[in-house]
Amino acid sequence: RELYGVQRWGNGYFDINSDGDVVVQLRDGDSTVPVSLQKIIEGLADRGSAMPQLLRFRDLLDRRIEDLNESFLTAIKETSYQGSYRGVYPIKVNQQQQVIEEISEFGRKYNYGLEAGSKPELIAALAYMQDPNAYLICNGYKDDEFIDLALRAIQMGIRVIMVLEMPSELPAIIARSRALDIRPELGIRFRLSTKSEGHWAESGGDRSVFGLNSPQLIDAIDLLKSEGFLDCLTLFHYHQGSQLPNIRAIREAATEAVRVFVSLAQEGAPMEILDMGGGLAVDYDGSHSNFASSCNYSLKEYAANLIEVVQQHCDETNIPHPTLVTESGRAVVAYYSVLVFNILDVTRFSQPEEPAAPAKDAHDMLHNLWEIRNRIDRNDLQECFNDALFYRDQVRDLFRHGVIDLRARSAAEKIYWHVCTRIAAKAQLLDHIPEDLQTLQSNLIDFYYANFSVFQSLPDSWAIDQLFPIMPIHKLDTEPTHRAILADITCDCDGKVDRFINRDGTTTYLQVHDRQPGEEYNIAAFLVGAYQETLGDLHNLLGDPHVVSVGIEEGEIIYTHEVEGDSVADVLSYVEYDPKDLEKRFRNFAEKAVSKGKISAKQRKLIVDAYRNGLSGYTYYES
Ligand code: PLP
């Protein structure tokens, strides 16, 4: 538990049981029950569903919506804030239909709305806006088609607010509003000057791509006034960037924002809503710090800080407290999904077992290497390492010059890795580990080959070094004795994960159990519900994994919303192959092979069947 930091990043949703399995805490009626992830995977295997699997827990999604809303409601109550909180979920963070459906149903009791940043998102959102009190906030570029749809939705009684991202949008909205004779409800997105920290710092500040700067804002106000549309402006919006680690920066931005909000009200606009964007962070590494993968505040502190800043500045200027909106995405959906994958194979660098001694007539260099073993306890470790490296390089030179054969080289390298393993083990006991020996320790980390694609399922791990909690989901009642990095099954050298969370912070290896060939060993990446599913790509044509929603009813695990992962035919069709045409071409090749006498007609049948099965199969390794 401590080794992998589960209690720090698990937020009470994940833990380890006495059988050594990772469990997810799910609500079953009025109680919360620990459900073993390994048992969930075994149930899926019994149903014939292969690894990797993306598990979704709707209960965790509901609890995040509840926690977010209740945190604001508590802060509002405690401070006697006069306004309310009405969050919106930004569809871009996880656009899957199940997510939007669950959010619109469960969120109804909080008048929880949606944020759309593009035409497809608007079209999806409009079909789920069943609550007339919830907002549909429209960010992003808006063409006439977008604007018309938003205006007509207003006519239907949906609370659609179009937020100006660019100065040029305003004349277009005014023109379409006049043409359709429908008054819009408007917001303005502003570029705050306050800079943030973390991966997405550039989304806020003067150089941010979106939003109006202060001269553009004043021009927009003047245009609204001169065109008679100032009464449509009710909302002020800013977005500081995602995963904001530091509460101080959040407060600073809120202070600047509420000043602008007040100024707009003083200009005569009927300002009602302050939309503080996304940014609410997830503590991926559990350090509760201002590192990029963490945050130094809780949900409750976040809500309390925003309410306090807004209240204080509105009171000073006698402006009524606005309705607060946050567009929190990551914090709502990150916990929802867990990716589970199996280990296919292992390459070991550490060699704790003593290899065979060199034959009597072996080259001297092999004997020199072998002899280092006897000195490790007596001599300086650095000296032993220098010698081992020297002799190993000599052996490689001898091989290059044809003096020794491949078998001798292989025997020498086995001895070398054994010597290094023993040196590294001893070095761990030193007060100060010399730099070379530190590097040696990292070179002794094994490769565990994992049945998934980093590019498809953990794209932020590859693209921006985002840290995700990753750990074995079973066998945790025994000591994990090996160190490994995870290599995925794309043949790309970037297809690996080599940063992990452990009890001391982060490490360059994952502590794993020994795995014998053929043995089942399952690992999970947690907190992957935000951004990963749609940002993932088809590198090496590895497609979407199987997805299933898991819940619990009267103690039984319930599997719903099963979505089969992409088949080979699916991914090939995404890159414009026609699977039927492929099969036809292959059949013709096979027929030619028959006519040339290379294969028999019966063999052709077997080969064509295998090709057809391959097309309909899963893109991942199937055991
Ligand atoms: N709102 C806007 C305008 C965004 O661009 C984003 C994403 O960066 C979000 C909300 C969601 O942010 P987060 O996932 O950090 O809550």
Image (spheres, rainbow, N blue to C red):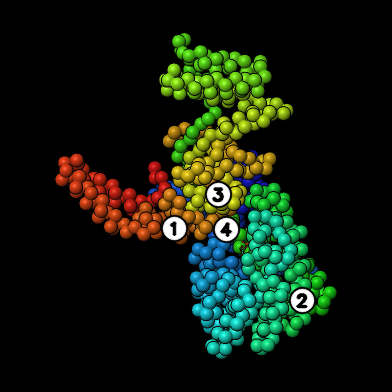
Drawn side of residue 337 relative to residue 361, left or right: right
Residue 205 horizontal/vertical position (percent) = 70, 64
Vertical placement of residue 66 versus 318, above or below: above
Q: Earlier in the sequence, mark 3 or mark 2?
A: 2
- Mark closer to the observer (1, 3): 3
Q: Residues within 10 Å of mark 2 (few under 14, many from 20)?
A: many
Secondary-structure class at tag 2: helix
Q: Is residue 74 visible?
A: no
Q: Earlier in the sequence, mark 1 or mark 4?
A: 4
Does mark 4's beta carbon lie closer than 8 Å to ligand 1? yes
Provide the residue designation for mark 4. 530
* Quadrant showing the N terminus: top right
- Residue 562, label in figure: 1
Q: Looking at the picture, which amino acid does disc 3 mark?
A: Trp
Q: Earlier in the sequence, mark 4 or mark 3?
A: 3
Drawn side of residue 37 relative to residue 467, left or right: left
Provide the residue designation for mark 2. 262
- How many numbered marks are there? 4
Q: Earlier in the sequence, mark 1 or mark 3?
A: 3
- Mark closer to the observer (4, 3): 3
Provide the residue designation for mark 3. 462
Q: Residue at x 22, y 47 (%)?
A: 590
Alpha carbons under labels 3 and 2: distance apart? 42 Å
Secondary-structure class at tag 3: helix
